[in-house]
Image (cartoon, helix red, strand yellow):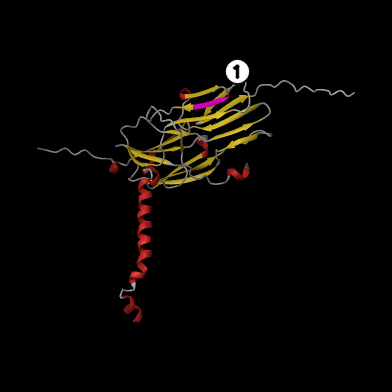
Amino acid sequence: MADTQSKELKVRDKQEVASPAEQTTPGLVFTPAVDIFETEKEITLLADMPGVKADDLTIDLRDNTLTLSADVAPADNTDEQDILVEYETGRYYRQFTLGELVNQENIDAKLNDGVLRLSLPKVEKATPKKIAVKTG
Amino acid sequence: MIYRRLFNVPTWQFRSPFGELERMRQQMDRLFEEARAPYQAAQAGVFPLTNLSEDKENYYVRAELPGVKGDELDIQVTGNNLAISGERKIASEEEGARYHRREREAGTFSRMIGLPGDINRDNVDAKLEDGILTVVVPKAEIAKPKQITVST
């Protein structure tokens, strides 16, 4: 990772959710950037969600569909006048289909500095059974 | 010239089809520029993207920097410019992790933001909360609006 850490960051616009269904509430909805990796024991998901408080984040897992949604409280800066607006704020929403069974009891979520870290432990599989083939 | 006598048109008209194309291209460019969202048109194209606002007392500079710690940020004021630089680090995970997706990026950044008025550089306040950096820059006395009462 040493080579990637020294490079200069490029501007990336926040991705708006492209959903066929229209939202019932006004406001923008963005797709958070994520890293997903798996090890032998678990699947880990890291998501960039700046401005999200732990209470406003909803993580839902049912039928192998993981849904992340988060509300961002609008800043109480009604007295302020915008001079330059380069990014917009809004809710975050993203859905994933998990290919593997997840042990729902031990899901762990942490939110630090606007980054969510979600650990999804895999269900321990039954030990593979060897079938002996007899000859004769 | 025999050329001109034959066709009886001034030579500049031969260039005009290309001129017309060029004019159309410029109009199309302008159309696309207008169709873009206003905030995109104003972007400086330097990370981090910044929102700047003001009230009577202060300028507010906000930027989204998820995963950046306060001690990894370097904020300096020079004249009426605010310089924000730092590095976003993403810790490498344990050996044997197989990545499905890798959309988050690590790297260094450096940005200079020019503030539109004079500032009081001694009382600049910066805080980083939930991945959002907010820098409050107080305006200099001279840049604050002064109420003028109209005498009757």
| Residue A25 drawn at (x, y percent) | 38, 27
Residue nearer the viewer, B147 or B46: B46
| Residue A89 drawn at (x, y percent) | 41, 34
Instruction: Judge whether B14 appears above or below A132 on screen.
Output: below
- The residue lying furthest to the top in this view is A105
**Numbered circles on residues, count:** 1
Can residue A64 be spotted in the picture? yes
- The residue lying furthest to the right in this view is A136
Q: Is residue B101 magenta?
A: no
The residue pinned by badge 1 equals A105
| Residue A46 drawn at (x, y percent) | 56, 31
Amino acid at pointer 1: Glu
Residue nearer the viewer, A86 or A22: A22
Badge 1: how crowded within 10 Å, few (<14), some, or many (20+)?
few
B15 vs B151, left or right, is right
Q: Locate residue B7: give its quadrant.
A: bottom left
B85 vs B34, left or right, is right
Instruction: Judge whether B43 appears above or below A125 on screen.
Output: below
The residue at the point 57 percent across, 28 percent down is: A97
The residue at the point 62 percent across, 43 percent down is: A2
- Which chain is disc 1 placed on? A
Pick the quarter of the image with the C terminus of chain B: top left
| Residue A83 drawn at (x, y percent) | 34, 42
The residue at the point 59 percent across, 33 percent down is: A36
* Magenta-tinted stretch: A64-68
Q: Main secondary structure of the magenta part?
A: strand
